[in-house]
Amino acid sequence: YQRRVRAELSQEIPEEHRGSEVSYLAPSAEPTPAHSLRVVVDVMCQGLGKKLRHIGVDCAILEDNQTVDDAARLALSEGRVILSRDSNCQRLVRLTDPGRVYCVKAMKATDQLLEIRKHFNLVVEDEDLFSRCAICNSSYFVKLEPGQARALKISQEQYNSRKISKWQQPVTVDCEYKVYERRSIFNEKIHVSTEGVTQYGVRLQLDKVSMNKFNETQMFWGCYDCGKMYWDGCHLKNFKSKHNL
């Protein structure tokens, strides 16, 4: 099976994209805005990948069942830099362009993040922090005020207990799509059904938000692509302090 995968990859990747020598990505002399960096991390660096998303980096994270061959394909097709560790790095260099792979040296995700910030000379601004979903990498969010989020949570709970009909008139909430790559905001009204599902089929995960948060928090953000909920809190301050941002 592995020989077949290698053969398929050799056929799919052009000869000019296969380096013959091990050549890792050199340090960046110029400052790099965090939101402009596009990377893919393999299974060796999944923890690092989530932290990179926290600072606004466009980071694809391979699943456990994916291989370095998948990382190579993704990097070449989407123009991403590959972050990996140990022996994987040499194979990745030979499957892609010279200088497309960076071999991470640190062991812990926190130390790895510092290493990547230094190597790429990353500039992280406040608006980059938590501008991407840590779960799916989306940069689009539904913006909800506490009253809206609370009403939708109650509606979800009532629907789940069958106290209201699924045919009840949908609730209308204001939505802001925040796209940090372009630094612009798009306003649009969307419909959220009584079960907390948007008209685009995404269920906002308000069941994971405790009721007391609606009295403590000024704004909630729901990932537009997977429904993961975020809110302003001490975690932002703690993250900035822990990583010297």
Image (spheres, rainbow, N blue to C red):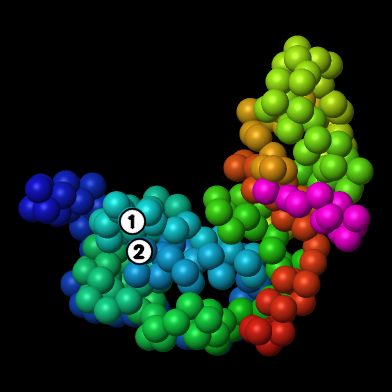
**Residue of label 1:** 64
Q: Residue at x 35, y 64 (%)?
A: 43
Q: Is residue 52 above or below residue 15?
A: below
Q: Could you say which quadrant of the image residue 87 lies in?
A: bottom left
Q: Quadrant of the C terminus?
A: bottom right
Tell which of 155 and 9 is nearer to you. Answer: 155
Tell which of 236 and 42 is nearer to you. Answer: 236
Q: Secondary structure at mark 1?
A: loop
Start-end of magenta stretch: 208-219
Q: Residue 209 at x, y = what percent?
A: 73, 50
Does the CB distance between marks 2 and 1 fall below 8 Å?
A: yes
Labelled disc at residue 76: none
**Residue of label 2:** 43
Q: Is residue 240 visible?
A: yes
Mark 2 is surrounded, within 10 Å at the Cα level, by few (under 14), some (14 to 19) or many (20 or more) other residues, namely some
Q: Could you say which quadrant of the image residue 126 lies in?
A: bottom right
Q: Is residue 45 left or right of residue 171?
A: left
Q: Residue 122 at x, y = what percent?
A: 61, 79
CA gap between label 2 and label 1 equals 6 Å
Q: Is residue 167 above or below residue 203?
A: above
Q: Is residue 4 left or right of residue 52?
A: left
Q: Residue at x 85, y 42 (%)?
A: 150
Q: Residue 217 at x, y = what percent?
A: 87, 59
Q: Residue 199 at x, y = what percent?
A: 71, 25
Q: Residue at x 78, y 18 (%)?
A: 164
